[in-house]
Image (cartoon, rainbow, N blue to C red):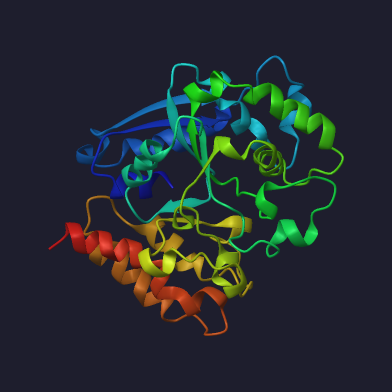
Amino acid sequence: MLKSAIALSRQKLHLVLMTEDEIIPKLRDPMLGWPPTFMNRVSVEFHPISYPDYVNQTEWRGLYRLCSTHKLFIADILRHIDAVILLDTDVLFLRPPEEFWEHFSRMNKRQMMGLTVETELPGQGWYPRHVRGFPIYRDQGVNGGVWLMNLTKLRSSLWSGRIVKIYQFFKGHIKFGDQDIVSIYFHYYPDDLYLYPCEWNFRTNQCNRLERCSSVERKGVSVLHGIAGAFHKRGQKNKIAYMPIYRTMDEFTLGSSLRSGLLDPMKFWLRRLPSTVWCSQVQDILILGLERFINETET
C-alpha cells in the first residue's frame, strides 16, 4: 500500500503510520532502502495504537478486528493534523493519492467525512440482505476501508460522543465494528457525509453486476481494496483476480518504468485468469485507471 502511493504520487507525501511498537521496524526498514528520489518527497511519523481516555480501551480494541475501531477516534488522537486520507492496509493505489485528496475541496461546510456506499443499489449487498437490529445509511451502508477525514471539523462537532452512544445502544447487533457504527451514524446525520466515487474504493463484490460500481466502467479503478484477504487467498474464484495486481506491485522496483514494471505484467497475468472468475470479466477495468495515468505521464 505504501509503495503504491509513493510510486504514483508526483507531490510530497506525509505518512502517518499507526501500529503496534513491534511492527514499526517492519514498516520503517524496507522504506530505508527505497530510492532517495522518492523518499526525499516523503515524510513519516509513527504512532502507537491508542484510544482516548473516555472509552473502555479493552472493549473497543476487541470490537470486530483488533484495533479496527481505532480510526473512529483519530481526530482526538492526531490533534496536530487537519485532515487525513485514512486507509486500511489492504488497499493499493492505481491513481495518484493527490487526486483523491482533491475531494476535500469538494466537501461543503457541513461535510466532515468522505466514504463510499457499500453497494450502489439499495436492497442489494450485505447490509440490506443480512443486517437486522440497526438502521443503515440509505439502505445501503458505507464501507469503512478508505476514509476522507477532516479532523478539524470532527473535533468541532459532536462526533465522538455520538459514536460512543451509538455503540452503547446497538452493540448487541454490531458485527463489523467501525463500519457498522459509521453506517448507523450517517443514517441519523446524512448531511455530515460526502460520498466520493466508488472507483476510489473498489472491492471484489463490485465485480458482480448486481453490486457494480458504475463509475469504474468510465474511469477505471483508482484504489483497489482487497477485502477478506483478496490479495492473498487462493482457491476463491471471486477473489483471485486481485492477486496478480498485488503481486506485481509487491515485486515492482521503485524507479522502474511504470509501464513495463507494473502495467504490462498486470495485463499479462490478468489475461491468464479463468473466465469463470468474476473480476476476470472486468479485468480491463481493473487497470484502466492505472493505464490512463501512465499514458498521461510516460511517453
Q: How many marks?
A: 0
Quadrant in which residue 283 is drawn: bottom left
Viewer-side residue, 291 vs 181: 181
- Residue, x 52% and y 73% (percent of image)? 279
The residue that appears at 64% across and 71% down in the rendered structure is 236
Q: For the point 57% across and 37% down, which residue is it? A: 191
| 213 lies above or below 9 | below
Above or below 88: residue 61 = above
Please identify the quarter of the rendering in which residue 208 is found: bottom right
Q: Report whether 46 appears left or right of 72.
A: left
The percent coordinates of residue 138 (x first, y second) are 66, 51
Residue 276 x, y percent position in the rendering: 57, 84
Residue 139 location (% of width, % of height)? 70, 54
Of all residues, the one furthest to the bottom in this rendering is: 275
Left or right, 298 with respect to 288, comes to: left
Q: Position of residue 227 (x, y in %)?
A: 59, 56
Name the residue located 40 percent from the left edge and 37 percent from the top edge.
Answer: 104
